[in-house]
Image (spheres, helix red, strand yellow):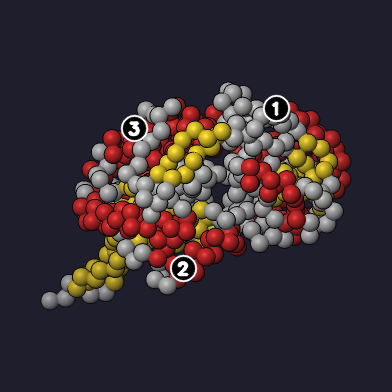
């Protein structure tokens, strides 16, 4: 396996570990503060020329970038399996998502329309002006897609981008940056800077030449970034934590709801801000649902992430595995699924818990692991109240055959992304983001380039 190179290194090095085995397999040089500043300044110098590129040419370059990613899907996927422990099926989808997001936003440069607004005495028009240098801070749970959600619309809108991958998972971002250059993206337009959050990420917040920060990660860190950006009134998009509810009504197809629940909760070993980590089941069918859920959890395939049929791999690190396990010390465990024994990797069995009260930590806190809590509810009002009893509001699901009920509950649940009889949260052509402490702003969808630009209003007098 070829490890991507980086021009940085004054900040030391990070040892990359395979989560499936616990064994190190690469060293990635890290940037220090001076190297970070130099990269930001290069992006700033590249900005005027990139902004001036004709829309059709910028679109062509983004299409070439998408095609280059497409030609390296398998290479990127295998890097992600080794670096993140993602199943090979998920990793292929994630690499394909980068390609698709680039292809989608390659249409934006030629379609980022302003407006002509009727006014007396002249003509009023608006323009979308790019911001300048955009800093994208990417988490370790979905390194490829979340990177693409930031850099693709930012580049399409005419900005240059500096991107910090998570310390634990830098490899695919570094390789994508190489592919960008091979596709013809000019030097300095898209730069990946591996490094520590307190150095590189913090510098994105404090450096005056970085005009916007996109951050995906924990709510606590996001709050700190928000406070830091306030000093410069810096533009900001936050995609933070979640504690999403999967609401199952008595009229639902219970077999379908139970069969789909493990994937909704345990995909990526539960390390997903959209994970349906709380299941609310109407009391009249609660016992029956648990009867159906147990074999579905037992059948959920936890295995070597390189296996074609793997549904769940390891957690990202020993620290993350141990953090999740501590929540189970005093929990009522209903049943567990498969695990992988005889290995040094960071494995954990999918686990179903029954909280004693709505104040239990397993019910209220984002564990970020393969644990789902199940609780009964009485009626629609109770389901909505229990679903909303959280500081988060990112995603969720509603299972019912009654479309009127589905729409009532969907309007009542305080969440940015809801699915009816499904656990689908993300489509690159629809907006994504959270309510409450799950974030600020929206990513993806047709309007994403707007969040990487300023609206300029120009009035032209026609009076003689």
Q: Residue at the spot x=47%, y=44% of the render?
A: 14
For label 2, the SS is helix
Q: Residues within 10 Å of mark 1 (few under 14, many from 20)?
A: few
- Answer yes or no: do the residues labelled 2 and 3 have beta carbons within 8 Å? no
Viewer-nearest of discs 3 and 1: 1
Percent of width and height locating residue 105? 37, 44
List x then y, in percent, for residue 54. Answer: 21, 48
**Residue at the limit of the structure toward the top, as seen here:** 308
As drawn, the residue found furthest toward the left would be 464
The residue wearing badge 2 is 228
Q: CA distance from mark 2 to mark 3?
A: 36 Å
**Rendered-image quadrant of the C terminus:** bottom left
In the rendered image of this protein, does residue 461 appear above or below residue 183?
below
Please give the name of the residue rendered at 27% of the width and 74% of the height, measured from the top-left corner: 120
Q: Which residue is mark 1?
A: 342
* Quadrant of residue 87 within the rendered picture: top right
Earlier sequence position, callout 3 versus callout 1 = 3
Instruction: Say whether residue 38 is left or right of residue 87.
Output: left
Give the numbered dot on residue 68. Answer: 3
Foreground of the two, 70 or 302: 302
Q: What is the quadrant of residue 88 in the picture?
A: top right
Q: Between residues 312 and 445, which one lies in front from this camera angle?
A: 312
As drawn, 57 above or below 242: above
Res. 419 in view: no
Separation of marks 1 and 2 at Cα, in angstroms: 45 Å
| Residue at 41% over, 56% down | 200
């Amino acid at each position: 396996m070829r490890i991507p190179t980086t021009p940085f290194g004054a900040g030391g090095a990070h040892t990359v570990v395979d989560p499936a085995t616990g064994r190190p397999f690469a060293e990635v040089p890290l940037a220090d503060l001076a190297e970070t500043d130099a990269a930001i300044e290069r992006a700033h110098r590249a900005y005027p020329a990139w902004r001036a590129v004709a829309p059709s040419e910028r679109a062509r370059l983004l299409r070439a970038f998408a095609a280059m990613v497409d030609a390296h899907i398998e290479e990127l996927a295998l890097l992600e399996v080794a670096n993140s422990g993602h199943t090979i099926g998920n990793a292929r989808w994630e690499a394909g998502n980068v390609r698709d997001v680039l292809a989608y936003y390659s249409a934006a440069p030629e379609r980022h329309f302003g407006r002509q607004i009727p006014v007396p005495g002249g003509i009023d028009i608006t323009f979308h002006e790019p911001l300048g240098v955009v800093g994208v801070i990417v988490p370790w749970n979905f390194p490829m897609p979340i990177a693409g959600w930031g850099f693709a619309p930012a580049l399409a809108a005419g900005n240059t981008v500096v991107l910090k991958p998570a310390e634990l998972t830098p490899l695919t971002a570094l390789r994508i940056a190489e592919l960008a250059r091979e596709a013809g993206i000019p030097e300095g337009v898209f730069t990946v800077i591996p490094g520590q959050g307190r150095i590189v990420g913090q510098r994105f917040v404090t450096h005056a030449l970085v005009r916007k920060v996109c951050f995906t990660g924990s709510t606590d860190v996001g709050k700190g970034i928000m406070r830091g950006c306030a000093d410069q009134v810096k533009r900001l998009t936050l995609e933070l934590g979640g504690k999403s509810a999967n609401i199952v009504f008595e009229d639902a197809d219970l077999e379908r709801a139970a069969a789909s629940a493990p994937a909704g909760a345990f995909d990526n070993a539960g390390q997903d801000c959209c994970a349906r980590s709380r299941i609310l089941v109407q009391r009249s069918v609660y016992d029956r649902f648990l009867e159906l859920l147990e074999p579905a959890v037992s059948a959920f395939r936890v295995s070597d992430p390189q296996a074609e049929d793997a549904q769940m791999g390891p957690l990202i690190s020993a620290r993350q595995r141990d953090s999740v396990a501590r929540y189970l010390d005093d929990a009522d465990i209903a049943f567990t699924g498969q695990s992988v024994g005889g290995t040094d990797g960071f494995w954990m069995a999918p686990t179903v818990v029954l909280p004693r009260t709505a104040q239990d930590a397993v019910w209220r806190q984002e564990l970020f692991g393969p644990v789902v809590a199940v609780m009964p509810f009485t009626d629609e009002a109770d389901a909505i109240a229990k679903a909303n009893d959280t500081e988060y509001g990112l995603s969720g699901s509603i299972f019912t055959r009654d479309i009127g009920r589905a729409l009532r509950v969907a309007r009542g649940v305080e969440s940015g992304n809801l699915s009816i009889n499904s656990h689908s949260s993300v489509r690159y052509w629809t907006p994504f983001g959270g309510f409450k402490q799950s974030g600020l702003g929206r990513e993806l969808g047709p309007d994403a380039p707007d969040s990487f630009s300023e609206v300029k209003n120009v009035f032209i007098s026609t009076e003689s």
